[in-house]
Image (tube, helix red, strand yellow):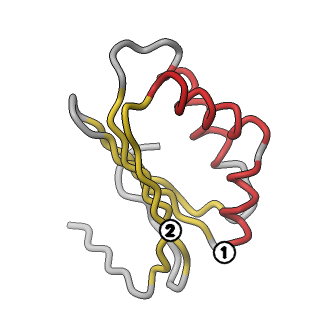
């Protein structure tokens, strides 16, 4: 997935994950690709946007309900990725869940 996610009319939810990586890949990129592919198959998933440079990565995933977010958080494969993130891949990270009340999309 790349580009700007085309989401439905609000309300819906955004999960904003910001991270600073440790040095080296150690399977990170493969796991990240797998998580995007798996998340896209989950009930309630609406889309995803992600960007990373040398200092900071930000991924925003969009979901129809808080229950859908909770189910994704508890998914067995996602839990494995979360643990590897804490033990190997991230120096620091933040996770924010927001309700989207309004959106505008402009395409030329």
Quadrant in which residue 91 is drawn: top left
- In the rendered image, residue 93, in percent from the top left (x then y), is placed at 40, 44
Q: How many marks?
A: 2
> Real-space Cα distance between discs 1 and 2?
11 Å
Q: Which residue is mark 1?
A: 65
CB under 8 Å between callouts 1 and 2?
Answer: no
Judging depth in this view, the residue of 100 and 104 nearest the camera is 100
Q: Secondary structure at mark 2?
A: strand
Q: Which residue is mark 2?
A: 97
The furthest residue to the right: 76
Q: Residue at x 32, y 36 (%)?
A: 20
Q: Secondary structure at mark 1?
A: loop
Mark 2 closeness class: few <14, some 14–19, many ≥20 residues within 10 Å: some
Mark 1 closeness class: few <14, some 14–19, many ≥20 residues within 10 Å: some
Q: Eyeballing the image, is 91 above or below 103?
A: above
Query: Left of 44 or right of it: where is 14?
Result: left
Q: Residue at x 45, y 65 (%)?
A: 6
Query: Left of 56 or right of it: where is 89?
Result: right
Quadrant in which residue 30 is drawn: top right
Which one is closest to the eye, mark 1 or mark 2? 2
Q: Residue at x 68, y 39 (%)?
A: 78
Q: Residue at x 29, y 37 (%)?
A: 52
- In the rendered image, residue 59, in percent from the top left (x then y), is placed at 41, 49
Mark seen at residue 57: none
- In the rendered image, residue 44, in percent from the top left (x then y), is placed at 69, 65
Q: Eyeballing the image, is 4 above or below 88?
A: below
For the C terminus, the image quarter is: bottom left
Q: Eyeballing the image, is 34 above or below 65?
A: above
Q: N-terminal of the two: label 1 or label 2?
A: 1
């Amino acid at each position: 997935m790349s580009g700007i996610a085309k989401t439905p009319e609000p309300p819906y939810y955004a999960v904003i994950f910001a991270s600073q990586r440790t040095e080296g890949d150690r399977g990170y990129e493969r796991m990240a690709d797998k998580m995007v592919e798996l998340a896209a198959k989950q009930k309630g998933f609406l889309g995803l946007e992600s960007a990373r440079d040398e200092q900071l990565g930000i991924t925003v995933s969009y979901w129809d309900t808080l229950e859908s977010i909770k189910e994704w958080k508890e998914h067995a494969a996602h839990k494995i990725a979360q643990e590897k993130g804490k033990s190997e891949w991230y120096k620091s990270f933040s996770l924010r869940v927001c309700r989207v009340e309004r959106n505008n999309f402009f395409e030329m």
